[in-house]
């Protein structure tokens, strides 16, 4: 059935894909974004649709609307952008979360929080499942994001217990695909752009750190399933359990682009998670979901996209 849906951060990478899916499913969508890292270009094709509205607004400010579902995605996701103004990142996560939970409470709306595998920090447990409480350094440069997201989860569960707000918490693992911002410094977009420009591929450290890389379409399907089912708050991991070293990713990007860029090693970044791999047992069991798009295929689609924008 058609719903009134609010998507905060809807002009960003994930948000724009989510808006596409919601509009395609017949819903009415308000996309709320302050355009800090998002862009009107990501949603330009939706702006002529009468069921789509864009509102330029900071999620930290009060917002009143009649909505049935809220997807709270507003927050810069790349380390470069969330560390640009760390106090702002904490405020967006914490004050923004309170604003949206208040809106959900007032409307009796369901709210999904886009949390992150970063809540596990530099994990001492591998792969990471939802029972793991994490290993986060509260004073590192990543903490504005990690602790902000952890506090947002806390707020969701407190609003759920205290006021009965219908919450959904998903922990998203590294996601990539078309419409990633060219300048956001994340590893997939960096490597593809470097390869296409014939520039050196910059590996920070020795390239032995690992990540699970999930293609955007798989994530959107997981988000839709989570939002649609009853009586399950999460938190639930949504990610691709394939685990790749950063060096393997660099080599795959070189192979798929046919680039002759050299790989160079730059100094390692401090306080980074060394290993990350999603345990998706809970997601398989409760959402009957698992990713369908393997890294090679997802990278080909993403490279095709970046070829059109470079
Ligand atoms: P993104 O930076 O492309 O999108 C974030 C959007 O939020 C942007 O459009 C930005 O302008 C907007 N925004 C930021 N601060 C805001 C504010 N104060 N008020 C209103 N809008 C604001 O990032 P993304 O990759 O699309 O990530 C979306 C969400 O998913 C984020 O909450 C992020 O933490 C979460 N997430 C993403 C990943 C990933 O790999 N992409 C992984 C884990 C979690
Ligand atoms: N990384 C890299 N070169 C780059 C960008 C990132 O080696 O040009 C590494 C980074 O140090 C980290 C991994 O790739 O170990 C993933 O980084 P990203 O910023 O994409 O995501 P996150 O660290 O938040 O998972």
Image (cartoon, rainbow, N blue to C red):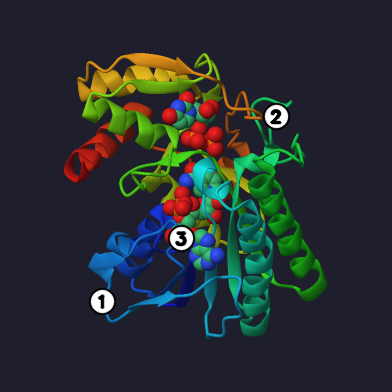
Residue found 75% across the figure and 73% down from its top: 164
Q: Is residue 152 left or right of residue 158?
A: left
Residue 264 placement (x, y as % from top left):
40, 15
Q: Determine whether label 2 and label 3 are within 8 Å by CB.
A: no
Ligand 1 within 8 A of label 1's CB? no
Residue found 68% across the figure and 30% down from its top: 122
Q: Which mark is residue 36?
A: 3
- The alpha-carbon separation of the residues under discs 2 and 1 comes to 44 Å
> Can residue 15 be spotted in the picture?
yes
Q: Quick one: quadrant of the C terminus? A: top left
Q: Label 1, on which residue?
A: 49
Residue found 75% across the figure and 34% down from its top: 135
First in residue order: circle 2 vs circle 3 = 3
Please tell me whether mark 2 sits on a helix, a strand or a loop. Answer: loop
Please tell me whether mark 3 sits on a helix, a strand or a loop. Answer: loop
Q: Label 2, on which residue?
A: 123
Tell me: residue 254, above or below residue 161. above
First in residue order: circle 1 vs circle 3 = 3
Please tell me whether mark 1 sits on a helix, a strand or a loop. Answer: loop
């Amino acid at each position: 059935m058609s719903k009134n849906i609010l998507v905060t951060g809807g002009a960003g990478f994930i948000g724009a894909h989510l808006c596409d899916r919601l509009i395609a499913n017949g819903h009415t969508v308000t996309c709320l974004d302050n355009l800090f890292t998002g862009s009107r270009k990501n949603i330009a094709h939706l702006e002529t649709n009468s069921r789509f509205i864009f509102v330029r607004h900071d999620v930290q400010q009060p917002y009143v609307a009649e909505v049935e579902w809220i997807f709270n995605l507003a927050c810069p996701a790349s380390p470069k952008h969330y560390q640009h103004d760390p106090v702002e990142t904490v405020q967006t996560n914490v004050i923004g979360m309170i604003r949206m939970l208040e809106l959900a409470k007032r409307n009796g709306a369901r709210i999904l929080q886009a949390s992150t595998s970063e809540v596990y920090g530099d994990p001492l447990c591998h792969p990471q499942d939802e029972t793991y409480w994490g290993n986060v350094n509260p004073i590192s440069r990543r903490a504005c994001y990690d602790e902000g997201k952890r506090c947002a989860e806390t707020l969701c569960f407190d609003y759920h217990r205290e006021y009965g707000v219908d919450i959904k918490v998903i922990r998203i693992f590294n996601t990539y695909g078309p419409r990633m911002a060219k300048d956001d410094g994340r590893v997939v977009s960096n490597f593809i752009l470097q390869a296409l420009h014939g520039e050196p591929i910059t590996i920070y450290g020795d390239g032995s750190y690992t990540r699970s890389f999930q293609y955007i379409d798989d994530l959107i399907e997981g988000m839709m399933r989570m939002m649609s089912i009853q009586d399950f708050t999460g938190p639930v991991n949504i990610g691709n359990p394939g685990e790749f070293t950063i060096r393997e990713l660099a080599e795959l990007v070189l192979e798929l682009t046919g680039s002759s860029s050299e790989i160079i090693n730059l100094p390692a970044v401090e306080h980074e998670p060394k290993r990350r791999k999603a345990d998706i047992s809970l997601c398989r069991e409760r959402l009957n979901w698992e990713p369908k798009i393997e890294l090679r295929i997802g990278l080909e689609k993403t490279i095709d996209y970046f070829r059109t924008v470079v």
